[in-house]
Each structure stands twice: as structure tokens, then as C-alpha cells.
Image (tube, rainbow, N blue to C red):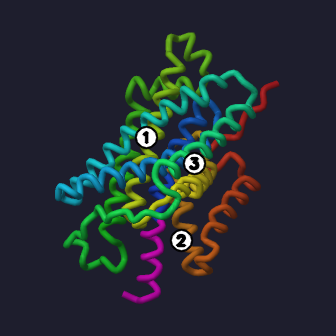
Amino acid sequence: MNSELQYFFELVFSGITKGSIYALIALGYTMVYGIIELINFAHGEIYMIGAFTGLIVAGLLGIFGFPLLGVLAIAVICAIIWCAAYGYTIEKVAYRPLRNAPRLSPLISAIGMSIFLQNYVQLAQTSDFLPFPQLIPDFEFLDSIAYIVSSTDVVIIVLSAVVMTALHCFIKYTNMGKAMRATAQNRKMAMLLGIDADSIISVTFVIGSALAAIGGVLIASRMGSIDAYIGFLAGMKAFTAAVLGGIGSIPGAMFGGLVLGCCENLAAGYISSDYADVFAFLILVLILTFRPSGIFGRAPVQKV
């Protein structure tokens, strides 16, 4: 294969891998915003806690000689449970008491919770980078294309696609999903029809936190190291992906994450990797300037 074409495919597959993680985190942002119109800025820290949970579980299981894929599966499950509990608690403590407060109050609470979780993890763990074990083994059937896409990339892309498809089916076909959509469209009317809006909001936080936990473990295994600050930048980029696709739109969050990951990688590969983060946020500025509602979002209807 031509070296230039090989380099292009490397960037694309790496971008899709990165974009899949952005999409998993962005789904948490867009689901919460779709129901209560709140940007949960502590969501990136849930992703970070998921990575640390995976590290602790992987370290314990590694002592007993568990196979790598078994360690990965158990680490992901434990991270999902732990982060779901964090998401539920954060909604109860930081957001529910401010449900009827001015719009700025829950936003400040979200930022405060983000800073609190960062410092909490630093005190409980460390502020230094910690090595994260490689939990995904090399697959022999990928040897012929290993120079383009790694086994880690394949697992992340496939698992992310399965999770996002399952979420789409859950939202579209289950009674809980229908209740979530009804609450997102009109919370007061949903409550009049007998839907427990508070429970629906809690479930939304739990699901979003679980998705972030999956992303945290997967990307930590790919990157090989974590620290208490990885959630901030990943959270900002996932928020960019959610805005790019249309905040409040689940398909938009998926698409926005993939587009952002590919654009960021291609720009870094062909222009300069030193400005990879700049390209991501430049996309956010352009989207907010020329299409504030995002690719799949709908412009708000002005009521007379």
C-alpha cells in the first residue's frame, strides 16, 4: 500500500477510535441536557473516575493471573456500577435541590462538583500520572493490517458501536425510553400523565455515567496512563462533539463524536500535532457561529 494512503488510513482509524470515546461521553451530556436543559460539567470527572476504577480492579485481578479480556470485562463492569452510583448521587446532591432555581445556580453547582471530584481523586489516589495496563491482547487475524489499525482500536470501535446501538434501541423501544423521550419533550405534561420525572432524570444520570465509565476504561487501556485531570479535557471535547451533532440529539452526539475525532486527528497529522486541541475547539467556535443548533439539532421555536 502507498505510504501516503497508509498514513491516511492510520489517521482515520485512530480518529474513529478517539471519536467513539468522545461519542460515549457526549451521550451523557446530550441526554441530561435533553431532559433538564443542564450541562453537567462534572461528567468528564465521572469518565476519569471510571478510568481509576478500572485501574484498581485491573491491578487486583492481575495479581491472581486473570486473562486480559476477563480483566477488561470485569474492570468495565465494576467501573459502570461505581460510576453509575456516582452519577445518581451527584444528581441527588448537586442538581435536584436546584431544580427550580435560576438557570445559573445548577451551572455553578456543576462546575463546583467537577472541581470537587478532581481534588477528591487527587487526595484519594495521586496527582501524578499512573501507568494503566494494556488489557486488550493482540489478535492474530489483524496481523496483516496491524500497521493501520490495532486490536485495541478494533475493540473500542466495536464495543462503542454495540453500546450506542443498544442505547438507541433502549430509548426508542422500551417503556423507560419512551418515558425519557416524553419527559424531554414536556416534563410537566409527562408528570400529568403519571410519569415520575424525578426517577427518569436519575436514570438518565445513571445511564450517562455508565457510558462515561466504559469510555474511561477503554481509552485508559489504549493510552497507557491516567491522572486526575484526564476528565477535564475529554469532557470539553465530548461537549464539543455534543454541540457539533446537536445538543439534546442522541444520533447527533454519536455523529459529532466521530466527526470531531476524525477532524482532530487529520488536522494534527497533516498540519501539526501541537495544536490538536486547538483544532477541536476551533470546530466548536465555527459550529456555534454558523449553526448554533448543531448538525442534527433543531433551532428553538419562538412562541408568540
Percent of width and height locating residue 222: 39, 65
Q: How many marks?
A: 3
In the drawing, does residue 203 fall left or right of residue 147?
Answer: right
Q: Is residue 15 above or below residue 243?
A: below
**Disc 3: which residue:** 119
Q: Name which residue lies at 72% across and 48% down.
A: 292
From the image, tell me which residue sits under label 2.
Answer: 265
Q: Which residue is mark 1?
A: 83
Labels 2 and 1: the sequence-earlier one: 1
Disc 3 secondary structure class: helix
Q: Amino acid at mark 3?
A: Asn
Q: Indicate left or right for 278 with 159 as reference.
A: right
Q: x%, y% of residue 257?
A: 52, 55
Q: Is residue 4 magenta?
A: yes
Q: Which residues are magenta?
A: 1-15
Camera-nearest residue between 88 and 249? 88
Residue nearer the viewer, 61 or 81: 61
